[in-house]
Image (cartoon, rainbow, N blue to C red):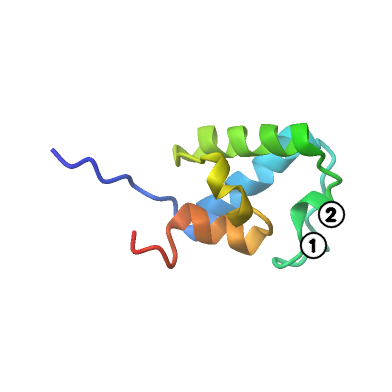
């Protein structure tokens, strides 16, 4: 039996990031937000909001997110890359 984790597609990862942000900022609007815009500043996420975002994202995607991974969750692009395993040999 394989223990390899199935990673979400880029499209699924993007949807999960948006859902996780909306979990803590229900009126978050992604229409004019660039993929390289830092999410914490754009959506005014304080430390507790960001923790809620990370926990929700982990739940939605079944991708474990450790505190050491938080620097990889800065923008939409970095979140999608982390969740899909892009660049980490996954």
The residue that appears at 52% across and 32% down in the rendered structure is 59
Q: Tag count in the figure?
A: 2
Residue furthest to the left in view is 1
The 10 Å Cα crowd at callout 1, few under 14, some 14 to 19, many 20 or more, is some
Q: Nearer the viewer, residue 47 or 25?
A: 47
Q: Can you say which quadrant of the picture contains the N terminus? A: top left
Residue 32 in which image quadrant: bottom right
Q: Nearer the viewer, mark 2 or mark 1?
A: 2
Residue 25 in which image quadrant: top right
Q: State the CA–CA distance, disc 2 to disc 1.
A: 8 Å
Q: Nearer the viewer, residue 77 or 13?
A: 77
The residue that appears at 66% across and 41% down in the rendered structure is 19
Q: Earlier in the sequence, mark 2 or mark 1?
A: 1
The numbered disc on residue 42 is: 2
Residue 36, position in %: x, y?
Answer: 71, 68
- Label 1: which residue? 33
The answer to whether residue 22 is left or right of residue 43 is left
Vertical placement of residue 59 versus 85, above or below: above
Say if mark 2 contacts mark 1, CB within 8 Å: yes
Vertical placement of residue 40 versus 62, above or below: below
The answer to whether residue 75 is left or right of residue 80 is right
């Amino acid at each position: 039996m394989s223990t390899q984790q199935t990673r979400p597609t880029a499209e699924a990862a993007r949807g999960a990031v948006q859902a996780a942000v909306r979990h803590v900022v229900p009126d978050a609007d992604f229409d004019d937000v660039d993929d390289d815009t830092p999410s914490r500043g754009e959506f005014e996420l304080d430390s507790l909001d960001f923790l809620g975002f990370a926990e929700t994202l982990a739940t939605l995607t079944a991708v474990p997110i450790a505190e050491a991974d938080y620097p990889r969750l800065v923008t939409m692009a970095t979140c999608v890359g982390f969740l899909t395993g892009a660049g980490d040999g996954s």
